[in-house]
Image (tube, helix red, strand yellow):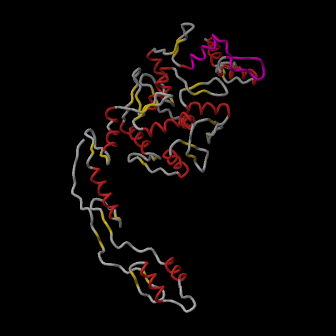
Amino acid sequence: MKQKSVNILTKRTSGASTKYIFECDGCSKKFSTKDILAKHISYSHKTQKNQNNTTAVRTQLEQTPVPQLTEIFNCDICEFKTSQKGRILAHLNAHVAEQVYCCNNCDYKSIKKDNLQKYMKIHTGEKPFSCNICKYQCIYKSHLLTHMKIHTGEKPFSCNICEYKCITKSDLQRHMKIHTGEKPFSCNICEYKCITKSDLQRHMKIHTGEKPFSCNICEYKCITKSDLQKHMRIHTGEKPFSCNICEYKCITKGDLQRHMKIHTGEKPFSCNICEYKCIEKSYLQKHMKIHTAEKPFSCNICEYKCIEKSNLQKHMRVHTGEKSFSCNICEYKCIRKDNLQRHMRIHTGEKPFSCNICKYHCIQKNNLQKHMKIHTGEKPFSCNICEYKCITKSHLQRHMKTHT
């Protein structure tokens, strides 16, 4: 720890002359203190009816404004001012202390030696305080006390507008900006604005391309530690969030919130061109590309184009021959996870899609859609040589062979 010294002017006074600031209402004379004014009123303005003019003195003194400070002590380092000598000396000692205890590893400075000792644990990695319920460890006791509220469920801070409750005052202050619409932090590259400084710092990594967190199992890299933690659950198979209505389990809280809308039937996002409604804004944005015919993702091997990046990644497996999903019962392998899920229904006998007119059940939704055309009489595929019409494209292809 380095120790530095500075030369500080400990006292400076301004306004050395006395200011007469207390004025008598009876004769307009001015006095330097309230005590002298009180004596003047008592002895100089006695009335015949009231020799002890106490009420008159009290009335004027209550109405007399608080005096302006006549002697000001100014700090020569900052803009601090006070009328009390003791306060200026204590303030100046703080400036000296600021430069006494300095970290050898970074620019941190502390007023107190024990503060620096605690801070040094950041560099050493020492975390002397640990939770007796989970594996949480920290440097400061105050951080542990805050953490324990997670286990006790205590949320002492609550919003006076909505039902939000939280553990810390700072969390509540951040939450209140949602109601006020305040977004004090803005990006100097794009129009992004946000509530917290940490959100802006994460956003800036999008522009810099920085991805400091990486998976030690696969090549995944990301901007935040929380994103990496969520990703690792893919490898561990951990699904900490579960639905209380069905057996659905998932990796993130956001996934569970989206799933719950399936049960509630809530679809807050709707297309202004067709009747399409959906659970998420991102789903609507993808859907709108159907109307605009926009397909921003294209294959560099064939002419395939698509709306979503994930679809392109799946398509590329057609060229690479990669079949990353395999059945644990038979030798079936496939490109897509949903294909495997459909295949597994062959083994389980599950047929989740059923006709509301007859007893038909099937594995896939598109099979049900084809079946329904039997009831409606719809035959969208027709032969351009004869009058043959049919329900499915595969039936038309078989029919065309009769002409050849």
Q: Decide whether residue 276 is among the magenta residues.
A: no
Which residue is located at x 51 percent, y 17 percent? 335
Q: Which percent across, then down, holds residue 363?
A: 66, 17
Please indicate, yes or no, whether residue 291 appears anywhere in the rendered image: no
Q: Is residue 10 left or right of residue 364?
A: left
Q: Is residue 19 left or right of residue 359?
A: left
Q: Which percent across, then down, holds residue 5?
A: 21, 51
Please indicate, yes or no, whether residue 59 appears anywhere in the rendered image: yes
Quadrant containing the N terminus is: top left
Which residue is located at x 72 percent, y 20 percent? 354
Q: Nearer the viewer, residue 169 or 162?
A: 169
Relative to 318, residue 122 above or below: below
Tell me where residue 268 sits by quadrant. top right
Relative to 286, residue 162 above or below: below
Find the magenta span and give its range.
338-362
Relative to 110, residue 124 above or below: above
Q: Is residue 48 left or right of residue 345?
A: left
Q: Which percent across, then down, holds residue 134?
A: 49, 28
Q: Nearer the viewer, residue 356 or 66?
A: 66
Q: Nearer the viewer, residue 47 or 121?
A: 47
Quadrant containing the C terminus is: top right
Q: Which percent across, then down, holds residue 283?
A: 57, 34
Q: Is residue 218 left or right of residue 400?
A: left
